[in-house]
């Protein structure tokens, strides 16, 4: 089923994702596109029923006030504009309503009343459309999937297995930056339980040698992203008919990697770290879904809840939780302390309550006391956050007995650590990850 679409043009607003989600919440698909989209580009988008021009405080780029092409108003599609519109615009608002209820009323009036759009956006229809798109795109060719075992790549795997079956080749790369026991769990789940066509590549030493001495987080992400692609290219050369690379890219990855009116928050390895000479055509069926929609998609595809609601894990893995230049002792401290945190959260029932929780180890030491002697070792920082779409996040208020038990275990069981801290910073101003 072809779904009607509302296009949101980014004219410097910080509320683009809020508006996109609000439109989807009333049952109509939405996408965000740059302000300088041409009428020709607009006409190539399927089933566009309306345009929302979303003006805001970031509408001056490089000293010049940006604007939407006048020709966009003349394509015959209804337009709603916020604080920026010609006199003949269908609807103009000075600012978006403050409450979700008022916003929904405005959007319903425009989307259903003015645009005559049909409320046919839902995950079931999305899956049907993506299966058809993937089949048309791939034909009888094989597809490589970067399977980390996280939620995003697992959902992509399930979707592609439904779409193209054994044409999908799942490649799991152990880059030496996985959580404790995770590669083994991935083997058990995908190879033995889901009967996936799985190739397991142990490239841990290769990745760690490339990252040696690299402290800048953006450079680390790009090195990891580039090396992932190189590993996939090598695996593809061992096979025949591989022309496509599938990735678990989701919408927050794209937004945080920067737009024409918003600065980069952080480059995601599958967005900002891809090499220019990429040898594959990309398949990214989830690239316009928010995290909660990805989970809903996974459940609709029949994946077990234990997989769909597993802990989110960044593509660069523990590489962005071992802050600064990665060293063996700090990497192991992150891995072991993270395992303790996950075990204790599960015992306390927090694994089902808290959206994401993990530890980080910074690249500095502090003075402490161990075995009645002065120690000079690393701190472990615990982070636990709740969010719906990963664009904003709040801090979970952990009960003291749980925190104290975790602290005691980390100090007793993890080498080279003499201090445990709890991160109380929400997003914004902090990001969910430290790097």
Image (spheres, helix red, strand yellow):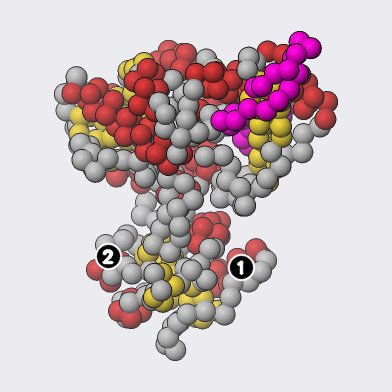
* Corner quadrant of residue 108: bottom right
Left or right: where 130 falls relative to 57: left
Residue drawn at the location 58% of the way across and 75% of the way down:
95
* Corner quadrant of residue 407: top right
Give, as a single range, the part of the protein colored magenta. Answer: 349-377
Mark 2 lies on residue? 41
Distance between the alpha carbons at the discs numbered 1 and 2: 28 Å
- Is 321 a magenta residue? no
Left or right: where 13 falls relative to 136: right
Q: Is residue 422 above or below residue 128?
A: above
Is the residue marked by circle 1 packed among few (<14), some (14-19), or many (20+) residues within 10 Å? Answer: some
Query: Front-most of 133 and 222?
Result: 222
Q: Secondary structure at mark 2?
A: helix
Is the residue marked by circle 2 packed among few (<14), some (14-19), or many (20+) residues within 10 Å? Answer: few
Point out the residue furthest to the bottom here: 87
Image location of residue 260, percent across then percent down: 39, 62
Q: Is residue 402 above or below residue 131?
A: above
Tag on residue 318?
none
Mark 1 lies on residue? 103
């Amino acid at each position: 089923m072809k779904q009607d679409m509302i296009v949101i043009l980014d004219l410097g607003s910080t509320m683009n994702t809020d508006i996109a989600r609000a439109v989807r919440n009333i049952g109509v698909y939405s996408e965000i596109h740059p302000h300088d989209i041409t009428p020709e580009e607009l006409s190539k988008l399927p089933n566009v029923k309306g345009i929302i021009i979303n003006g805001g405080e970031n509408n001056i780029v490089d000293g010049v006030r940006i604007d939407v092409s006048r020709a966009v108003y003349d394509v015959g599609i209804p337009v709603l504009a916020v604080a920026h519109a010609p006199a003949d615009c269908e609807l103009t608002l000075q600012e978006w309503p403050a409450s979700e209820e008022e916003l929904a009323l405005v959007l319903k009036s425009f989307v259903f009343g003015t645009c005559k759009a049909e409320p046919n956006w839902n995950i079931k229809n999305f899956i049907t459309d993506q299966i058809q798109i993937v089949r048309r795109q791939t034909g009888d060719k094989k597809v490589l999937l970067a399977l980390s075992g996280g939620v995003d790549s697992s959902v992509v795997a399930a979707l592609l297995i439904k779409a193209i079956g054994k044409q999908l080749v799942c490649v799991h790369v152990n880059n030496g930056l996985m959580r404790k026991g995770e590669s083994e769990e991935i083997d058990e789940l995908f190879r033995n339980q889901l009967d996936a066509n799985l190739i397991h590549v142990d490239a841990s030493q290769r990745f760690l040698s490339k990252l040696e001495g690299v402290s800048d987080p953006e450079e680390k992400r790009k090195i990891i992203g580039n090396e992932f692609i190189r590993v996939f290219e090598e695996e593809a050369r061992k096979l025949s008919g591989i022309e496509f690379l599938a990735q678990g890219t989701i919408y927050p990855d794209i937004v945080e990697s920067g737009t024409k009116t918003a600065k980069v928050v952080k480059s995601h390895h599958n967005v900002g770290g891809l090499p220019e000479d990429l040898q594959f055509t990309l398949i990214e069926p989830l690239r316009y879904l928010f995290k909660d929609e990805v989970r809903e998609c996974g459940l609709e595809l029949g994946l077990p809840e234990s997989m769909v609601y597993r802990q989110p894990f960044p593509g660069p893995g523990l590489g962005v939780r071992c802050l600064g230049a990665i060293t063996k002792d700090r990497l192991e401290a992150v891995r072991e302390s993270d395992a303790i945190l996950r075990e204790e959260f599960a015992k306390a029932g927090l694994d089902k309550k808290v959206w994401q929780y993990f530890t980080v180890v910074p690249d500095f030491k502090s003075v402490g006391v161990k075995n009645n002697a002065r120690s000079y070792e690393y701190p472990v920082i615990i982070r636990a956050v709740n969010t719906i779409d990963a664009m904003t996040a709040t801090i979970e208020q952990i009960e003291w007995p749980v925190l104290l038990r975790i602290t005691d275990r980390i100090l007793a069981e993890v080498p080279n650590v003499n201090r445990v801290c709890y991160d109380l910073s929400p997003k914004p101003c902090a990001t969910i990850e430290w790097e």
